Amino acid sequence: MNPAPALPEQVTWTPREVAGAAGLLRHVLLELGSAGSEAAVFGAAVSLVADFVAADVVAVLEGEHVHGGVGFGGRPPLRGMLRVVRDGTGHVAVPGLGRVRARAFAVPGLAGVTLVAGWAHEPVDVDVAATLDVLTGLLGLAVLALHGHERERWMHLEGERDAAELSRLHEAVTRREQVLAASLRFQREISSRQPLPDLLRRIGASASELLGGRAVCLVLADPRHRMDLRVVASAGAPALAAQRALAAAGHVVGGVSPGPAEVSDAGGRATAVAVHITGRAVGALVVETTGADALDEVGRTVLLAFAEHASMALTQADALQAVREASCDPLTRLPNRVTFLQRVEAALRAAGGDGAVAVLFVDLDGFKAVNDTMGHAAGDQVLAQVGRRLSRCLRGGDVAARIGGDEFAVLVHDPEPLHTAGRLARRIARALALPVEVGGRSVQVGCSTGVSVATGEQGAEELLRCADVAMYRAKQAGAGAAVAFEPWMLEEERLRLDLEADLARDGVEEEFELQYQPVLDLDGGAVVAVEALLRWRHPQRGVLEPAAFLALAQDCGVLARALPRLLHAAAAQVALWRAEVPALALFVDLSPAQLGDPELPDLVRRALHAAGLEPGSLLLDVPASVLGWDPELLRARLGSLRATGAHLALDGFGAVAGAPLAPLRQLPVDVLKVDAALVAALEGPAAHEAAASVGRMLELALALDLGVVAQGVASAVQAGLLRELGSPAGQGPALAAPQAPAEVAGLLAAQREAARG
């Protein structure tokens, strides 16, 4: 037999404790009892709870509606609190406080009403829980008492009025209570952002029900044509004639009648009340009055109240859309720059200087070529797909945004921000490197990423700027690279901005000049070609190499202005040298953006004609990254250049491991230029794999009858290995440095004399 449960120990209170408890109880009852409405009762209750149990956050919930709240600093986190209500306890994320431990307490006597209290630091102990049980009980009593007082007001009339009057008053009070209950329900639904079409249909149905089943229509104006009215919801039987409803609505929408308007026709009558969005009439709630009594005072109240509900629903939907448009990028549906910076500021405040916040600045590679070759509509489709892929790469708490153009950013909040950001950057690079389908075509873009970790001193703007600075370093590191910000990069960024300002000067393109790097036959050492390399003779900084300014010059349009003069100068120079070395060829680099320029073939023809240069001696270097373009588009672009008589070289081939070789068979390419990184790897730890890759390229070139030039030959060892592998030609600092035209002329003259001797 189980022992009988022990009786709880009797609690004895001292007279002082009894007096204190009584005073406390009197204070609570006075505070709650003096409130004249449910909202005021709930507001007083959350304040009392916060004071009595030192809670950091308190709210009262009824279903999904928050009646009152303190400590949230803005809109309470509804989802988190609903989980606490469901589970009884849990955590809620509160801006400025972080994760707050919370507990739910049902309010006795009020079905579906719950009080939620949370603490940032203190645990919920037994005494606090007991106090909250008492307070929620008093809250329930106060609300029930408030409802009882309302009922007593009309019951008091029973002794003063006759039965008919009491019946009429009872009916009026009952209908008003129904209107009030429906109003509260719709306000909650509007606040909880129920779907607008459903809300409008329910508003019409409830209005019809409270008007004794009269036919009701909700009429709205088309946003594009204000006087184009249409019925969007209807209720009641028989249905209200559409033409009569539209005519009545036209009176209030068109400003004919500022208040309720009654319209009669041969078929009957209808009364309309305007529906507004922020004070502007956009429609009307219309009720049938044909063959029925005119609307009494309560009926008019019903019509006005439900027109107001429709106005509130439409206004909130309009405001939400405006907020979305103001805070989101319309193309990708990601947050825009302003919203992203607000999120970063909030994350920095929540982190409290612990360095757990990082920002990634993601810039697309090759996107300009998509816009230039396929048009801006195709570019928009690519950006939309990039936005979706970027979102799929994120963890739960990360935030992605479109900053502008082809620039995106990601916010990371993590105890190891640099490690996590680096891993995320690699994931993003892999996702964005995959081909994108646009209008039945396949295009390829990549990305460069800069990472900046908060130090506790920066604001959001500074953190984003540092990530942007690091991104420019990543651009220089190669496709798909990610670089973490270092303080010394700011000085480099200052220099870059200075150069950008210098490039904006009138006539700056006249400061561009060419040097030429010889391409040598690896067997005999003879110069077989030269590559024209751009230099900027800066008035203060001296001669600058392309890495310092080429991307800037291309972005600001200076390079496009300079290209005709430079191409003509290179063609004319090589035409002169070919008088001494007839087989000499000229390599000229093209960027993806230049390749997409439809005027480029004519520009090439004019330069060849003006210089008198044999077309076949010009080799246009096309970057290997274009192999990711749509094959049809790429063949068309290369075909138009090949039609000028110039030959084409695929520059930087082998830069990406596993790059497709098959497209070469369908492209009008004449020469492969082996990437410098692959040549450098011939002396590295992966020398065997690099040699095998170069060997396969040489075999492919032989099978396709293509010429080969190995780039970036930096040592005699590399030159020897390339020679052994069968590479016919090479260029690089170990063979010959870029030189001024006069130096190249001297080199060619010496070569000619040696050949004669």
Image (cartoon, rainbow, N blue to C red):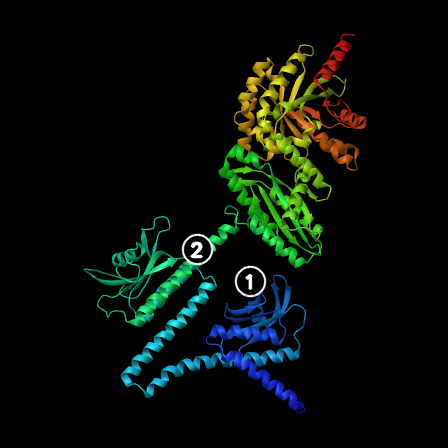
- The residue beneath circle 2 is 318
> Which residue type carries mark 1?
Gly
Q: Could you tell me how many numbered marks the image carries?
A: 2
> Which residue type carries mark 2?
Asp
Quadrant of the snapshot with the C terminus: top right
Front disc: 2 or 1: 1
Measuring from the top left, give residue 409's x and y in whole percent.
61, 47
Q: Alpha-carbon neighbours of circle 1 within 10 Å: few (<14), some, or many (≥20)? A: few
Q: Is residue 348 visible?
A: yes
Q: Residue at x 58, y 75 (%)?
A: 49
| Distance in Å between CA atoms under marks 2 and 1 | 21 Å
Left or right of residue 376, residue 417 in this image: right
Left or right of residue 123, residue 339 in this image: left
Foreground pick, 725 / 606? 606
Q: Alpha-carbon neighbours of circle 2 within 10 Å: few (<14), some, or many (≥20)? A: some
Residue placed furthest toward the right:
717
Q: Tag 1's secondary structure?
A: loop
Measuring from the top left, give residue 532's x and y in whole percent.
66, 22
Q: Identify the mark nearer the N-term, 2 or 1.
A: 1
Measured along the vertical axis of the image, is residue 552 above or below residue 729? below
Q: Quadrant of residue 348?
A: bottom right
Measured along the vertical axis of the image, is residue 352 above or below residue 552? below
Q: Quadrant of residue 201?
A: bottom left
Q: Tag 2's secondary structure?
A: helix
Measuring from the top left, give residue 188's x and y in whole percent.
46, 67
Foreground pick, 361 / 16? 16
Residue placed furthest toward the left:
266
Q: Is residue 440 visible?
A: no
Measured along the vertical axis of the image, is residue 373 above or below residue 522? below
Measuring from the top left, give residue 437's x and y in whole percent.
53, 40
- The residue beneath circle 1 is 74
